[in-house]
Image: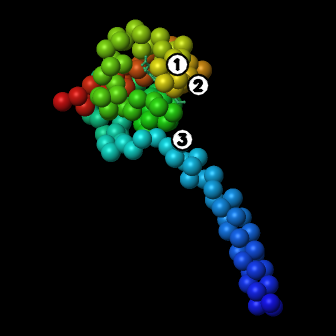
């Protein structure tokens, strides 16, 4: 009888511990699984690895790296990654003027991923945003072959 109760208490204590652990760890993996970005096997493109001579493209890169690069290097929030022609090809096909407009005014994609106006860097001039677009398009076309 004593032994029985003892085990019972241990059992209850164990169940509470197990439940507490489940509760503490339960949400983590599920949340991660639902928000995880699909695995991307291709290595990330280093925008500085590109050899460019054109002064405007060099300026575009200087603008692009610390601003646009925050999302467009690693694909944050569903942003098309620089140097990934699979992701950029269909966008480049829309024409530069559409891309300029979407970069300057913002754009909500078909999967509701948001390109904020000027990437959120409202102190950039329209001209600077266009130079940044020219750079990302050039870099992504360079990877086509
Ligand atoms: C906060 C993250 C973020 C920043 C910063 C950002 N972008 Fe984007 N951008 C996105 C996302 C997300 C998309 C994809 C939208 C979609 O689903 O088509 C996108 C898409 C684009 C597109 C393609 C638009 C189209 O019509 O397909 C261009 C061009 C672009 N960005 C340029 C820029 C430029 C230039 C900058 C810097 C001035 C910049 N982005 C900064 C998140 C960002």
Among the two numbered marks 1 and 3 on one chain, the one whose residue lies closer to the N terminus: 3
Write down the quadrant of residue 75 in the picture. Answer: top left
Q: Is residue 104 left or right of residue 93?
A: right
Please say if 38 is above or below 22.
above
The outermost residue toward the front is 1
The residue nearer to you, when weighing 5 against 113, is: 5
Q: Residue drawn at (37%, 26%), measured in percent from left and top?
A: 136
Tag 3 residue: 35
> Disc 2 to disc 3, how far (Cα)?
23 Å
Q: Residue drawn at (57%, 49%), measured in percent from left and top?
A: 30
The residue nearer to you, when weighing 86 against 102, is: 86
Q: Position of residue 99 (x, y in %)?
A: 42, 14
The outermost residue toward the left is 145
Q: Say if disc 2 is inside 8 Å of ligand 1.
A: yes
Among the two numbered marks 2 and 3 on one chain, the one whose residue lies closer to the N terminus: 3
Q: Position of residue 8 (x, y in %)?
A: 76, 80
Q: Residue drawn at (48%, 14%), measured in percent from left and top?
A: 102
Q: Say if disc 1 is inside 8 Å of ligand 1.
A: yes
- What is the number of the mark on residue 120? 2
Pointers 2 and 3 in contact (C-beta within 8 Å): no
Tag 1 residue: 108
At numbered mark 3, what does the secondary structure look like: helix, strand or loop?
A: helix
């Amino acid at each position: 009888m004593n032994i029985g109760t003892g085990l019972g208490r241990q059992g209850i204590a164990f169940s509470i511990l197990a439940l507490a652990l489940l509760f503490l760890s339960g949400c983590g993996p599920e949340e991660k699984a639902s928000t995880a970005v699909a695995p991307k096997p291709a290595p990330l493109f280093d925008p500085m690895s590109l050899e460019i001579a054109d002064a405007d493209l060099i300026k575009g890169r200087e603008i692009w790296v610390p601003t646009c690069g925050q999302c467009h290097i690693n694909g944050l929030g569903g942003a098309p990654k620089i140097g990934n022609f699979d992701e950029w090809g269909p966008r480049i096909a829309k024409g530069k003027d559409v891309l300029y407009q979407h970069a300057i005014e913002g754009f909500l994609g078909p999967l509701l991923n948001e390109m904020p106006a000027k990437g959120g860097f409202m102190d950039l001039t329209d001209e600077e945003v266009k130079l940044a677009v020219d750079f990302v398009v050039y870099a992504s076309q360079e990877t086509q072959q």
